[in-house]
Amino acid sequence: MGAADSKLAFRKSVFKLYEEKTIPPTENEFWELFWNLPETIDDVFSLIGANDIRRTRDSAPDNFETLIDKVLKKMQDTVHANQFPTDQHSINHLLNCCRIMTRIMPFVFESPEHTEWEERFFWTPRQVEKEKKNPEDKPEYETLPCRGELLLDLTIQALFLAGFTIPIALATKESKVNYMIWENGVGSSLPITTYKDNEANRTEVLRLLVVLLSRSMYVLPSQLLLKEDLWLRYVAVKTERKIVLVILCSLLNTICNYDPTGWVPYNHVVGVGPREQLVTFCLTALLILLDYRSPQQAETMRQQEQLHSPTSHKSAELPAQVETLTLENPDAIPRTSMELEVFTPGTTDPYHHKVDENAFRHYMSKMHRKQDFEFLMLGIYRLLSNPMTAANTYLPGSTKRVSCFIDVVMLCWRLIETNPRFIKHLVETERALDLTVSLIFYAMDNKDKMTQIGLVRMCAFILQTLSSEKEYCVKLNKPFTTHASLPNVIRLYAFNGTYADFLIISIYTLISSTQGRLSALYPAFMLTIANISSYVSNLGVTTSSKLISMFHSMASPTFLLADEYNPQLTCYLLETLNNLIHYHYTENLNLVYAVVLHHDYFDRLSKLTFTDAVAEVNRVRQMRERKSAEDEHETTLEENKKDHEDHKEDEEKPKLSYAAVVASNLPSNEAGSSTSNPERRDSTNTISAYPTRQGFVPNEQWMSYWKSKFPLSTLSALIEQLVPKMEE
């Protein structure tokens, strides 16, 4: 559509869609313009405006339905044509059909008023009258598949259409559709020759598939898990087993074979390459498919979460007192010995007797070959490490930084969540340490960006899940010799320690530098440290100091009384210190010395009463209010001084001193000394004025319960034995 005349003709045909209420389906010359005239996806998206689609949908629904039917019929004829590509069924025709459906489907999903129409039009089987042999015969009807099923089937078939998304040489005598894995890797050791046009066409078709599977974007969060997503369910549940395997392996292999780095610096500045676009859509489609759960499964998971606390799961390898939280596999699919490379359609698969199970999650959980795990982890780490490499080059901006790293982190999370064998393999290799560094990089780099809190959350949960594995915890004792090559955002000053030191100090930084913005992730961070504590030895001086500093903050009354479950975090930290000393006393002398040096922190916690805690909270609150009043008064004085600095008589007057300002804002019994303790109020009156989250009001019984849970006996015995010796 390079000529202005053809663009104008196409634009007029778009106008005609809503200007004429009913255009006959038999007017083929008009309908064929939609796949004959456009040449690029930009033509479709620029010449078919959003308002044009809405006006057609609302004011000329018959034309809207006819357009969809005509495009579906053209897609069906092209995909199933005996000869493809030809002038009658060209590649551009099929691309334009995909582009038009990609353009209009979001407007089908966006309107709640059209939900009933969508279900009726796309998901009701169609009755078509058969041709009569004799005019006098009674009419007979043929049941055709739903339009939604047909559109999804055609989209998937287009992903494996010879001469379109796979080489023309792979066509068979029976069909042009050949379900071949796109690239070598999981499920296929032999690569197929692929051309750039094939990859570009895959991107276009995957874009349509992602749009079709994204109906949940237009549903209110409160309704998301209450109503079935028929589009996603059809692909994730009803797709044939062989096709599921081919799609899964094709998407995984395309992602993991992608290498964003090039030989020439700055070769990426011209824009996002077609290969990265393809990988991005592969990631998006795969993550959507892996994330599907039926409303029944979602309700079951919700009930299980209510019955069982997520922090009640313990690792079999860890001591009983250390609680761990791992990402559970909610599907509970029985194991089989299925090989991914076996594509025998007649093979009995007990999976098909199950209802509403996600086939993609099912087969993702069945991968078990070592070479597959190595391939996946190599490809994932290559993409995860790219932003670190791009941020740490001698020539700024010379290395391409992939934009899909968040999706790669999510894919790693899904692998860990769905396949226990994958995490077992991961923690047995050095990749687990490399992954740890990458996750810390993403957490540190995005901790101050509110829009990326979800990424930080994923990193925290993956680290916590890794920490529940004994092999991983033991590996953390390895010296971190390559620390100096890290980007500035995670490089520690004068660091000379182990991966455990690096992990603990980084978690401390994430907590201390975010001013409570990551408070929802504190349990994950503290459980990570608690899980590794039984196996970590030779902690450095800095790490030991950070742990004690963290304990000082978490043992303070202001922290303990701020939230109902904050004392649980203090318990985790005490368990950490206990394990580090109990299991590796001689190897963690730096920590022992730090505990003894700051023994008063532990003494205060052991002697803390509810009354003392409330008094301390009030004292801190009054200090903050006093400081705020001082700052406000000082600001007023500076403004007054600036307004009257030209008047000599004002200069001769005595100025109000800083101490006088403080004294004037103190109660009469505190004016003499700003450091005197405030009068202790009755606990009932104090608590009623104490601001807490979610309406929580601490009381004596609550305090007694948590204080009895604090594991202070080991540390108290250590302090009792060593403090007198140090004082001597």
Image (cartoon, grey):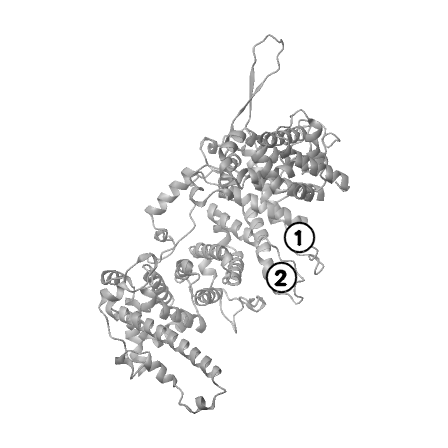
Position of residue 664 in the picture relative to residue 389 (left or right):
left
Distance between the alpha carbons at the discs numbered 2 and 1 = 15 Å
Local secondary structure at mark 1: loop
Residue flagged by tag 1: what amino acid is it?
Val
Residue under label 2, please give it. Answer: 390
What residue do we see at 35% from left, 43% from top?
A: 303
* Location of residue 184 in the rendering, given as x and y in whole percent from the top left corner: 63, 44
* Location of residue 460 in the rendering, given as x and y in whole percent from the top left corner: 46, 57
Q: Is residue 159 visible?
A: no
Q: Quadrant of residue 489?
A: bottom right
Q: Is residue 480 above or below residue 115?
A: below
Identify which residue, 338 or 413, lies in the foreground.
413
Which residue reaches farthest bottom? Answer: 652
Using a 10 Å C-alpha cutoff, classify the residue at mark 1 as few (fewer than 14 neighbours), some (14 to 19) or many (20 or more): few
Task: Pick whichever of labels 2 and 1 is earlier in the sequence.
Answer: 1
Q: Is residue 77 above or below residue 712?
A: above
Residue flagged by tag 2: what amino acid is it?
Ala
Q: From the image, which quarter does the C terminus lie in?
A: bottom left
Residue 272 - label: 1
Q: Is residue 107 visible?
A: yes
Residue 725 - label: none
Q: From the image, which quarter does the N terminus lie in?
A: top right
Local secondary structure at mark 2: helix
Q: Is residue 603 above or below residue 187?
A: below
Identify which residue, 170 or 202, lies in the foreground.
202
- Give the mark toward the camera: 2 or 1: 1
Q: Quadrant of residue 615?
A: bottom left
Q: Quadrant of residue 170?
A: top right
Using a 10 Å C-alpha cutoff, classify the residue at mark 2 as few (fewer than 14 neighbours), some (14 to 19) or many (20 or more): some
* Location of residue 527 in the rendering, given as x and y in whole percent from the top left corner: 39, 59
